[in-house]
Amino acid sequence: MAAPQHMTVYFDDEPGVGVNAYFEFGAQYFRSFHELRVFCDIELGGFVEFVEITDANYPTLKAQGVFDVI
């Protein structure tokens, strides 16, 4: 049996607003981090690494093309 696929999900959590998540297949908005986690468990099998987007890592992530999916 093949090993489950691992996916990195980049997200920015805006308290009181919601969570923007960036997947290799596109971007999606969630009302909360909990909603994002449930989506990943159901739709992606839970094999996910979450990386929070911060002011410090944003330039590096942008240079890596993380946001090119949108």
Image (cartoon, rainbow, N blue to C red):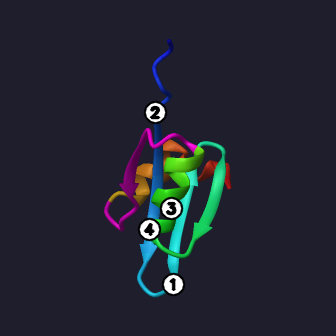
Q: Earlier in the sequence, mark 3 or mark 2?
A: 2
- Residue 19 place in picture, x, y as percent: 50, 71
Dot 2, crowdedness within 10 Å: few (<14), some or many (≥20)? few
Percent coordinates x, y for residue 68 in the rendering: 63, 49
Q: Measure the C-alpha gap from mark 3 to mark 1.
A: 14 Å
Residue found farthest to the bottom: 16
- Disc 1, SS: loop
Which numbered circle lies on residue 36? 3
Amino acid of disc 2:
His
Q: Is residue 43 left or right of residue 16?
A: right
**Rendered residue at 44%/67% (across/down):** 34
Residue type, mark 3 in image = Leu
Q: Which residues are magenta?
A: 44-56
Image coordinates of residue 25 in percent, x first then y, are 66, 44
Residue on which the image places disc 4 = 33
- Identify whether 38 is placed above or below 24: below
Cα separation, mark 2 vs mark 1, equals: 28 Å
Judged left or right of residue 38, residue 58 is left
User: Regarding mark 2 in the picture, which secondary structure is present there?
Assistant: loop
Main secondary structure found in the magenta portion? loop
Secondary structure found at label 3:
helix
Sort mark 3 into few (<14), some (14-19) or many (20+) by Cα contacts within 10 Å. some
Give the vertical position of 1 relative to 38 (above or below).
above
Mark 4 near mark 3, Cβ–Cβ under 8 Å? yes
Label whose residue precedes the other's in the sequence (2 or 1): 2
Quadrant where the C terminus is found in the figure? bottom right
Q: Which residue is mark 1?
A: 17
